């Protein structure tokens, strides 16, 4: 009988000369370890994200050094900075152009809640226009916090079932944002 083991959060059964897992877990692990981020950075939090990309913090260790500035080739939308109401439709369009499965990380107080800018022109949180998976608090958050948020996204991805994007709950979530899911 094989031994149950956790290899990079994938539950596997190791035996002599073989290793067993489920398709769900293997695909989830592949997704989590090869995410292409799309940085949507508008202000100071974006600078912290740039620092996170530097050699000191090294996102390459997660297989995430390849930025995607094309939404169609990105898996993770990282929103860092203040989003004005005028910019909100652009952010939503970028999100809609990403193919499924996609995730969103909201970095800092401004992206998450409008931050200190409780004004007529600033969107009071990006979750008013797109669904958010993980929020990173702080003004600005340090690179360590951004990495923590990214690792929480990895955790979600590792535990997401392949069926989630086809579920009624997911469709209802997209409908609540008036977004047509591109997963058929
Ligand atoms: S949360 Fe603070 S650091 Fe980040 S964009 Fe807003 S004001 Fe700048």
Image (cartoon, rainbow, N blue to C red):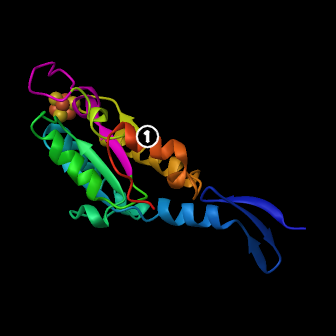
Q: Quadrant of residue 70?
A: bottom left
Circle 1: element type: helix
Q: Quadrant of residue 85?
A: top left
Crowding at dot 1, Cα within 10 Å, few <14 / some 14-19 / many 20+, comes out as: some
Q: Is residue 157 visible?
A: yes
Ligand 1, image quadrant it occupies: top left
The residue that appears at 38% across and 36% down in the rendered structure is 176
The residue that appears at 32% across and 62% down in the rendered structure is 74
Query: What is the span of residues highlighted in magenta in the rendered image?
Result: 103-123
Relative placement, left or right, of 155 versus 177 is right
- Image quadrant holding the C terminus, namely bottom left
Residue at the extreme bottom: 17
Q: Nearer the viewer, residue 136 or 123?
A: 123
The residue that appears at 31% across and 39% down in the rendered structure is 106
Residue 146 image position (x, y, % from top left): 34, 42
- Image quadrant holding the N terminus, namely bottom right
Residue 46 image position (x, y, % from top left): 19, 44
Query: Compared with residue 135, is residue 37 higher up or lower down, i.e. above or below?
Result: below
Tell me the residue that label 1 is attached to.
173
The residue that appears at 12% across and 41% down in the rendered structure is 87
Relative placement, left or right, of 180 versus 45 is right
Residue 71 image position (x, y, % from top left): 25, 61
Query: Compared with residue 65, is residue 167 higher up or lower down, i.e. above or below?
Result: above
Q: Is residue 90 magenta?
A: no
Q: Is residue 115 magenta?
A: yes
Q: Nearer the viewer, residue 90 or 74?
A: 90
Relative placement, left or right, of 139 versus 103 is left
Residue 126 image position (x, y, % from top left): 26, 35
């Amino acid at each position: 009988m094989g031994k149950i083991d956790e290899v990079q959060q994938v539950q596997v059964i190791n035996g002599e000369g073989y290793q067993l897992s489920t398709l769900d877990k293997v695909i989830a692990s592949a997704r989590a370890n090869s995410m292409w981020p799309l940085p949507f950075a508008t202000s100071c939090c974006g600078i912290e994200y740039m620092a996170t990309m530097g050699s000191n913090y090294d996102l390459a260790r997660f297989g995430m050094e390849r930025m995607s500035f094309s939404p169609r080739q990105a898996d993770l939308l990282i929103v860092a900075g203040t989003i004005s109401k005028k910019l909100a439709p652009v952010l939503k369009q970028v999100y809609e152009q990403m193919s499924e499965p996609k995730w969103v990380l909201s970095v800092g107080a401004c992206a998450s809640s409008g931050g200190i800018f409780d004004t007529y022109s600033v969107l009071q949180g990006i979750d008013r226009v797109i669904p958010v998976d993980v929020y990173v608090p702080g003004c600005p958050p340090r690179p360590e916090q951004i990495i923590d948020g990214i690792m929480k996204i990895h955790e979600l991805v590792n535990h997401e079932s392949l069926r989630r994007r086809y579920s009624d709950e997911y469709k209802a979530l997209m409908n609540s944002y008036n977004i047509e899911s591109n997963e058929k």
